[in-house]
Image (cartoon, coloured by chain):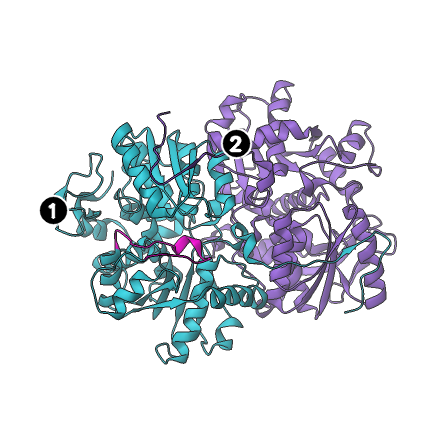
Chain colours: A purple, B cyan
Amino acid sequence: MSYVTHLECARCGKHFNSEEVQQLCECGGPLVVQYDLESVKSNFHKEDLKDREPSLWRYWELLPLKNKKNLVSLGEGMTPMIKMEKAGPDIGLSNLYLKDEGIIPSGTFKSRGATVGVSRAKELGIKTLAMPTNGNAGASWSTYGARAGIKSVIVMPEDAPEITRNECAITGADLYLVDGLISDAGKIVARAVKNYGWFDVSTLKEPYRIEGKKTMGLEIAEQFNWEVPDVILYPTGGGVGIIGIYKALKELQAIGWIGEKMPRLVAVQATGCAPIVKAWQEKKTESEFWNDASTCAFGITVPKALGDFMVLDAIYKTDGCAIAISDDDLLQAQAELAAKEGAFICPEGASLYSAAKQLKKEGWLKEDEKVVLLNTGTGLKYPETVNVKIPVLQPDEDIPKA
Amino acid sequence: MSYVTHLECARCGKHFNSEEVQQLCECGGPLVVQYDLESVKSNFHKEDLKDREPSLWRYWELLPLKNKKNLVSLGEGMTPMIKMEKAGPDIGLSNLYLKDEGIIPSGTFKSRGATVGVSRAKELGIKTLAMPTNGNAGASWSTYGARAGIKSVIVMPEDAPEITRNECAITGADLYLVDGLISDAGKIVARAVKNYGWFDVSTLKEPYRIEGKKTMGLEIAEQFNWEVPDVILYPTGGGVGIIGIYKALKELQAIGWIGEKMPRLVAVQATGCAPIVKAWQEKKTESEFWNDASTCAFGITVPKALGDFMVLDAIYKTDGCAIAISDDDLLQAQAELAAKEGAFICPEGASLYSAAKQLKKEGWLKEDEKVVLLNTGTGLKYPETVNVKIPVLQPDEDIPKA
């Protein structure tokens, strides 16, 4: 059983039946899963977690699956929360943490959305799913699709990380590249979905991906023993993570597991594609399409996010902010974190360290605040971001003295 | 505090002081950590684990670190144990499991050895460590070395997985390639260690890597609720994993957490480098140097392992076996596991599925036996093992109907 009551449009509030396959509301708004939180509060207790596996499915009562037999899992979640003992103080922050979503199947937080989204798709009888992707989401959904026995059709830009192609290919997806951006891939998928009747799992076009991403917020709260941190920084493309984390914390408040305090949520983008930052600076509630989007932090190259208004709402409601980082700065941050902490993370995640440095300098972050960098993936999938020049020795040669 | 009493040579039994920096015994044998298991038995209980983090450090009492301040951790361990619901029955095994060591920092089980080895090196005051590697071990030790503030000098074959170079480089190691095999790299490191006084962390030349690898055995036992499986298959290069798992299970017996039953341990190698398999077939207790070693499962290209006699001992004592798999077969197994289960694993790990298939065919494995494939790393680090031919669409083109 599940505690889901219905789906609700995030834009117009219209209700939908969660027992049927749903995509967007007629008004174009994403549908959001609603739970009977009073019943969850009565039946789900923190102590229950002690006996559960360290996967995101430990929060079963706050997830939308009805029957465990439909679970499509590869052991994802409860990713490490690592204190940055050197990298924090170096930028004037004595309580800086990295939540490392590189330590998860496919090496990306996208697998959270995929395990929940694909499980629920299986439960609802979906046979073929289709999506545009900047690489990682496609890899994750192909991976979980393979395990579920669901066919995946994936379209990604030619410039997306090459390793994500391998993942789609080896897990048996039908993969296409597009000579363009994710917005172009999205249009191709939209036409195919209409023509062939496939299930469209584009960002926020199905309701369950948010529920998977939400578990990052649940874990952060649990890992800080139900005292939320002061600030969470998140690299923002489609923004589902920030939407999910905000939803998670509201739900934890509703069931009484955390108090009234909310962390300030910070959306970090690249200067080459910063529609959310621009909207926040202009105090707007929606973003505009960002022309000529380009950054090496490829996962956040999203010129116009469907859920932009939800991201901005979460930022405004939590007194957060939005900030853009240049490619040069984020690549330098990536190298610094690797050398100081052994954390080889993706460029998207590295932008957060640069953002924290800048926000501390501006006084927006205080020295002793608990600050979480939500790194969305492993650096292993971005070998091209590392400069390597390595001497080659013959077997009889010696290593020169340093 | 720790429960370590001393170090003991695995070959001649001589005792060594664990409070001093040690490498090999004078007889050439590796040193193995010994604990006061009676005290561990009195002071450490299964129930203690409930309140501990899901990392390998949960088994603190069976690990060699004395002071938590020396802990060098990136949140490693408690990797998933995934039931192969399709891939198992397809080869006639109804209880086939994959323990997935891809879900760990640096995407390889080598990080287990590194977190324990580097932590203990830090505790003993080491400033520079040096090692030959087939790629992954070097990447892991560089990673943890960076976090510990210890300098790493790494030498790897030119043919080692390229991504491991990036990891060494970005975490600040001094990296050298050698036009040769790991055995050539080993000789270069041995000369440098002698000349410059560095700490040699080659496989089994320091005592603590085994302790890290051992935790795979502890986790397997815990994940099966302290009823060990019937068989564990392990891709064998240096063999530290199989040595560690065997040691773990003996220690769990000694503290009364598991019964007398031992899983049969299986060493899987590639036909292009199978010294342990040859020795086992000839009922020998040591292996011979394998000439012209070559396989795409690069991590197990070890022509002569220092701990070969320990691996063979573990196989004989548990009624296990050793088996070699061709590159063609293991690559096919890799593709099958990815497509059936969404498990994109490294070629070394994939060899296990091929081995299980063959051992079932030969009747060595029974249909209902609990069999664990210990996958040592993620497929993400081996993009060249995947064949990808992908159509490119223009933004106005359509996906053809399947």
Q: Which chain carries label 1?
A: B
Q: Gap between marks 1 and 2, in whole Å?
A: 43 Å
Q: Which chain carries label 2?
A: A
Nearest the camera: A351 or B277?
A: B277
Give how far across and how far down residue B258 sits, in percent: 28, 63
Task: Identify the element where label 2 is drawn.
Answer: helix
Task: Find out whether residue B305 is within the magenta segment.
Answer: yes
| Image disc number at residue B14 | 1
Residue in view at x 67 percent, y 50 percent: A135
Among the 4 quarters of the image, the one containing residue B175: top left
Type of amino acid under label 1: Lys
Give how far across and how far down residue A264 sits, in percent: 65, 32
**Left or right position of B214 against B335:** left
Mark 2 Cα shell of 10 Å, populated few (<14), some (14-19), many (≥20): many
Nearest the camera: B273 or B153?
A: B273
**Left or right position of B178 against A280:** left
* Eye-nearest disc, 1 or 2: 1
Image quadrant in which the N terminus of chain A is located:
bottom right
| Image disc number at residue A337 | 2
Q: B346 above or below B66?
A: below
**Left or right position of A188 against B68:** right
Secondary structure of the magenta portion, mostly? Answer: loop
Type of amino acid under label 2: Leu
Q: Give the range drawn in magenta.
A: B291-307
**Residue B368 seen in the figure:** no
Q: B289 above or below B277?
A: above
